[in-house]
Structure formats: structure tokens, C-alpha cells
Amino acid sequence: MILTEFHFDFFRDKVLFGERWSELLSALSRRRIVNIFGVWDNIDGEWFDDAPTLVEFAHGTLAVNVRSEIYLALAWNEIFSTEKPRWFSENIDFPGWQEDLDWREYSPLSIFKGAEILRVEVIEGENALNGLRFETDKGGFSIIDNGDVIAGIPHE
């Protein structure tokens, strides 16, 4: 899976986003999270925070991607944790760039493994969609663009 070549439809408008995704997000209620995955950079030993976050359920995987703190995109059953992620194709040569990425259980949100989704809401700002907020039976978390990095943040 080459992530920079995956076609995400990014939305800035909540109404248009809702027309495309509200039915799916509503259908996630009462589903249990099997796991949450982020992309781990094995060379740098840290989370690769430009890549989407995967929320895996028993019968589907939701990819959440945010960009520039104003655009939100989702994919359903198109990106999987079983496929090794690549940022660039092997044909692209960037001096000094080495790539060794893997999907790993996203430790900042590991407490939500097995949680039941109560609702999913869009996080919006002025003329912007900045992520998703998940309310679960174990509390809540957000997947947001946090200063041009994709971050999963538990709610207190």
C-alpha cells in the first residue's frame, strides 16, 4: 500500500462530508473496536504522524486522514493493517530518505481496544474539518490534525 498514491477525497465542508459519510459513521454505533493502528517508522523509532490512523472493527476498517488542519478524509475497507504501508513508491528516489514503515497498535489509544462506540462526531473549526471524535463506553478519543501531524488523543 503506497499511502501517498492512495486517493482520499478530502472534505472541508461538513455538509458535503456528511452527505458522503454520515450513514457509515452512524452505523459504527454499538460496534466494538478490535484495534487502532498507526504507522510506525522502524528507522526513526517513532510514530510516522503523516499517515492515516486505522480503526479496525470485526467487519471493517476505517482509515482517518486529516491534512493542513482543515481537511478530513475517510476510507472504509480500503486500507488494511495486514498490508505493509509504504509512503513512496520504490521508483521514487529521495536523497537521504529511507523507508521502513509498519502498521502497529497505536499505543496512545490502546485503552480503547475492545471499546464499544457510542457515537462518532466530526470536529470542525471555522471553514475546516479537523478530525473525528469517538465517544465509547471507555471514554472518548479524537483523531485530529494537531499542528500538521495526525494524532490520536484520549479525552480526559
Image (cartoon, rainbow, N blue to C red):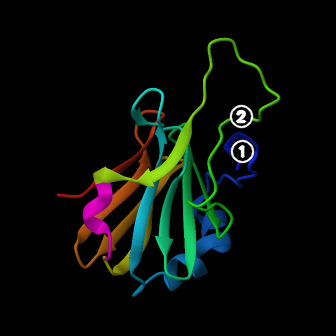
Residue type at the position of mark 2: Phe
Which residue is tagged 1?
2
How crowded is the residue under tag 1: few (<14 C-alpha within 10 Å), some, or many (20+)?
A: some
Query: Please, is residue 143 above or below residue 43 in the view?
Result: below
Q: How many marks?
A: 2
Describe residue 13's horizontal placement relative to residue 156 as left or right: right
x then y, percent, for residue 53 = 49, 54
Q: Amino acid at mark 1?
A: Ile
SS majority, magenta: helix
Where is residue 115, by image quadrant?
A: bottom left
Identified at 37% across, 68% down, the residue is: 134
Q: Residue at x 53, y 46 (%)?
A: 102
Query: From which residue to which does the magenta span run?
Result: 109-114
Residue 26 in sight here: yes
Mark carried by residue 152? none
Specify the quadrant of the image occupied by residue 60: bottom right
Direction from residue 1 to residue 135 in the image, left or right? left
- Callout 2 secondary element: loop
In the structure shown, which secondary structural element does the residue marked by tag 1 occupy?
Answer: loop
Is residue 88 highlighted in magenta?
no
Q: Relative to the observer, which residue lies in front, 68 or 76?
A: 76
Residue indicated by mark 2: 88
Q: Is residue 124 visible?
A: no
Q: Is residue 116 above or below residue 71?
A: below
Q: Is residue 3 above or below residue 57?
A: above
Where, quadrant-wise, is the C terminus in this rendering? bottom left
Q: CA distance from mark 2 to mark 1?
A: 6 Å
